[in-house]
């Protein structure tokens, strides 16, 4: 998921039972456990569907001129700005209703994995290219010294384990291992005994095992965003970069004579973009576009918020992890909507918001255990659901029996992350220009892969703005003629 959201009110219907090992009062959870990840620049994203109703009284707006204006300061928007600044002479302005890492970006686990990718799929080339660009950035940061990529990006080459527990799941993992190997990815299928040697505390039964990708990595979203912001900010003194936070976009600025889009009106500024306007607002993109393009309501990109919870246990020493782990069911939950793939693990999900839980587990450079993950369609709700946290904990305990003997007090050194993945029904991002508005580009719909696909998306958008052919085929991500089935 691409920033941490904050609960505003308890939901008594989801309170855990007194027998639960996951215990805390709601008042304490809300006060202590759902943390502001960006304390120095505290802010909360406004619901974009309410922008017009909350529009402030008209006031003189300061105007500035740029080559490109990016709406959205998540990992996608900031990465687009970075790529433009590093690889072109263009100037860039970034505007956001909140601050970085308060949307989906800061609410994820930070894995840069290929284990859940499918060779030959529409997103495969983009995933491969993005992984390559992250590798290059990490190598560059390592070359600068000062703690290198581990300290400045949270970079860890842990490798990933995609885990199965039944003979049917193992057959699927063997097929995936073969496909990934043929696509040039180092992959190995492990029996239960071989897996135990790598992860002694993981239990998959006699019929289980895993697919192991030793080259997979993970990063810390907050550290990555901080590094990207620092890079972008270094161009401010040249007059090439401007960032405007806590200032929601209100409308597009059009030419009175031709109707062409010239810029973006925020609550306090007018940002003119000579070459392009890029909308990279994650799950809020659909509502924002409806506000922007009211005269042309035929364009309706069906990106939806897919809410997720993660549980972060600070400096957790009761479980040792050597790799990043994900159950095979995660792949099914991620793609079930778009392909009809049957879910291979515990729960299913329907169009009415039913919950799915898949085990994911990572340990970051600080020794924090991050457990996930949930998926549900609940609009833009930011409420903490204690029953979901209990499900995440219980699901993890099925794979790590040690956790069954751990009493988890949610108040003690615990962080809850809630974010809204920008879900697309066809399972792939939207990256391209708006029909009839060639200088307005969209970059959204990355669902839970925003961090992993950010650098490749940024390169792609830059190539589109410059009119270059690009290193990755643009066509699978185009807007044109794509969404008629969702009307």
Image (cartoon, rainbow, N blue to C red):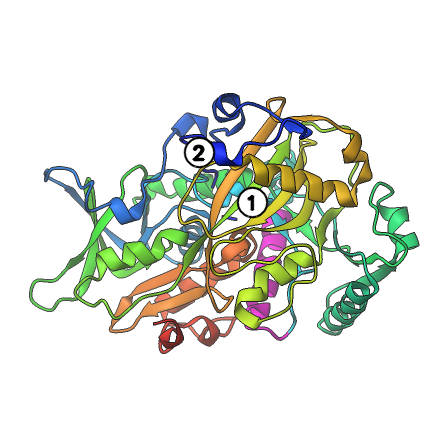
The answer to whether 124 is drawn above or below residue 2 in the figure is below
Residue 389 left/right relative to 282? right
204, 178: nearer the viewer: 204
Quadrant location of the C terminus in the rendered image: bottom left
150, 5: nearer the viewer: 5
Is label 1 in contact with label 2 (beta carbons under 8 Å)? no
Q: Is residue 309 magenta?
A: no
SS label for mark 1: loop
Q: Residue at the spot x=41%, y=44% of the render?
A: 232
Q: Is residue 20 visible?
A: yes
Badge 1 or badge 2: first in the primary sequence: 2
Local crowd size for mark 2, using a 10 Å CA cut-off: few (<14), some (14–19), many (≥20)? many
- Numbered mark located on residue 6 in the image: 2
Q: Nearer the viewer, mark 1 or mark 2?
A: 2
Residue 407 left/right relative to 17? right
451, 109: nearer the viewer: 109
Tell me the distance, in whole angstroms, between the alpha carbons under discs 1 and 2: 14 Å
Q: Residue at the spot x=51%, y=51% of the render?
A: 376
Q: Position of residue 186 (x, y in %)?
A: 77, 63
Q: Which residue is mark 1?
A: 108
Q: Position of residue 103 (x, y in %)?
A: 43, 43
Q: Which residues are magenta?
A: 120-140
Q: Residue at the spot x=53%, y=51% of the render?
A: 451
Local crowd size for mark 1, using a 10 Å CA cut-off: few (<14), some (14–19), many (≥20)? many
Q: Position of residue 408 (x, y in %)?
A: 68, 27
Residue 54 left/right relative to 239? left
Q: Count of labels shown?
A: 2
Q: Is residue 133 magenta?
A: yes
The answer to whether 94 is drawn above or below residue 131 in the figure is above
SS label for mark 2: loop
């Amino acid at each position: 998921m691409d920033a941490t959201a904050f609960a505003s009110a308890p939901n008594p219907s989801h309170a855990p039972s007194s027998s639960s090992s996951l215990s805390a009062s709601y008042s304490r959870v809300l006060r202590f456990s759902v943390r502001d990840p960006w304390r120095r620049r505290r802010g909360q994203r406004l619901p974009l569907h309410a922008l017009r109703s909350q529009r402030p009284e008209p006031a003189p707006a300061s105007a500035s001129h740029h080559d490109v204006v990016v709406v959205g300061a998540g990992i996608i928007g900031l990465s687009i700005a970075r790529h433009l600044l590093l690889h072109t002479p263009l100037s860039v302005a970034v505007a956001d209703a909140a601050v970085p890492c308060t949307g989906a970006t800061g609410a994820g686990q930070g894995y840069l994995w290929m284990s859940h990718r499918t060779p030959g799929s529409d997103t495969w080339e983009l995933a491969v290219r993005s992984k390559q660009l992250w590798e290059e950035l990490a190598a560059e940061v390592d070359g600068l010294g000062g703690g290198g990529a581990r300290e400045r990006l949270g970079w860890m080459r842990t490798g990933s384990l995609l885990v199965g527990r039944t003979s049917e799941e193992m057959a699927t993992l063997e097929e995936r291992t073969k496909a990934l190997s043929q696509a040039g990815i180092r992959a190995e299928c492990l029996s239960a005994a071989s897996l135990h040697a790598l992860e002694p505390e993981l239990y998959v039964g006699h019929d289980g095992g895993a697919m192991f990708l030793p080259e997979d990595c993970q990063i810390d979203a907050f550290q990555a965003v901080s590094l990207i912001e620092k890079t972008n900010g270094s161009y401010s003194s040249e007059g090439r970069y401007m960032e405007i936070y806590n200032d929601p976009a209100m409308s597009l600025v059009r030419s009175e004579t031709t109707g062409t889009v010239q810029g973006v009106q925020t609550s306090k500024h007018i940002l003119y973009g000579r070459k392009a306007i890029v909308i990279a607002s994650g799950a809020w993109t659909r509502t924002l576009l409806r506000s922007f393009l009211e005269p042309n309501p035929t364009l309706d990109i069906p990106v939806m918020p897919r809410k997720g919870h993660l549980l972060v246990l600070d400096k957790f020493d009761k479980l040792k992890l050597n790799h990043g782990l994900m159950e095979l069911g995660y792949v099914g939950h991620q793609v079930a909507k778009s392909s009809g793939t049957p879910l291979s693990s515990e729960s299913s999900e329907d169009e009415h918001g039913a919950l799915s839980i898949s085990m994911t587990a990572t340990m970051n450079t600080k020794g924090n255990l991050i457990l996930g993950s949930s998926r549900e369609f609940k609009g833009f709700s930011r409420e903490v659901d204690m029953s979901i946290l209990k499900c995440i904990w219980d699901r993890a305990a099925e794979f790590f029996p040690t956790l069954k003997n751990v009493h988890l007090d949610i108040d003690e050194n615990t962080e809850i992350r809630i974010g809204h993945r920008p879900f697309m029904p066809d399972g792939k991002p939207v990256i391209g220009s708006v029909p009839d508005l060639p200088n307005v580009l969209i970059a959204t719909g990355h669902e839970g892969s925003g961090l992993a696909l950010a650098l490749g998306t940024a390169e792609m958008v830059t190539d589109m703005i410059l009119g270059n052919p690009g290193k990755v085929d643009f066509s699978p991500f185009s807007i044109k003629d794509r969404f008629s089935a969702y009307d």
